[in-house]
Image (cartoon, rainbow, N blue to C red):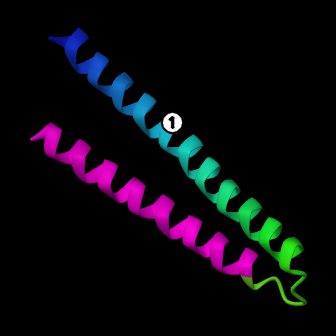
Amino acid sequence: MPDSNNQKSVSKFARFSSLGIQMGAIIAFFTWLGTYLDEKYKTKTPWWTISLALFGVMAALILVIKEVIQISKEDE
């Protein structure tokens, strides 16, 4: 049984590692989209960048919370 337990911990590590990459990609995409829209509409204050970056952070956190809940249910 030690191999099975070790395999579970490696699987969790891989899932959490990919979550970090996904979070970075989501936040980076929405921030890029915000800067693109600010440049396109030539806004003086970067409202698109600010709002979409915050939206990206919230979306990434929701993704992490859902994944943590799913992992905790699998451990039961």
Q: Is residue 38 magenta?
A: no
Residue 65 percent coordinates (x, y): 35, 58
Residue 53 percent coordinates (x, y): 66, 70
The quarter in which the C terminus is drawn is: top left
73 in relation to 26, above or below = above
Q: Quadrant of residue 41?
A: bottom right
Residue 25 percent coordinates (x, y): 63, 48
The quarter in which the N terminus is drawn is: top left
Please give left or right for residue 73 compared with residue 46 in the image: left
12 in relation to 7, above or below = below
Q: Residue at x 72, y 63 (%)?
A: 33
Say what amino acid the circle numbered 1 marks: Ser
Range of residues picked out in magenta: 48-76
Please give left or right for residue 17 compared with residue 31 in the image: left
18 in relation to 69, above or below = above
How packed mark 1 is, by other alpha carbons closer than 10 Å (few <14, some 14-19, many 20 or more), is few
Residue pointed to by mark 1 = 17
Q: Is residue 66 magenta?
A: yes
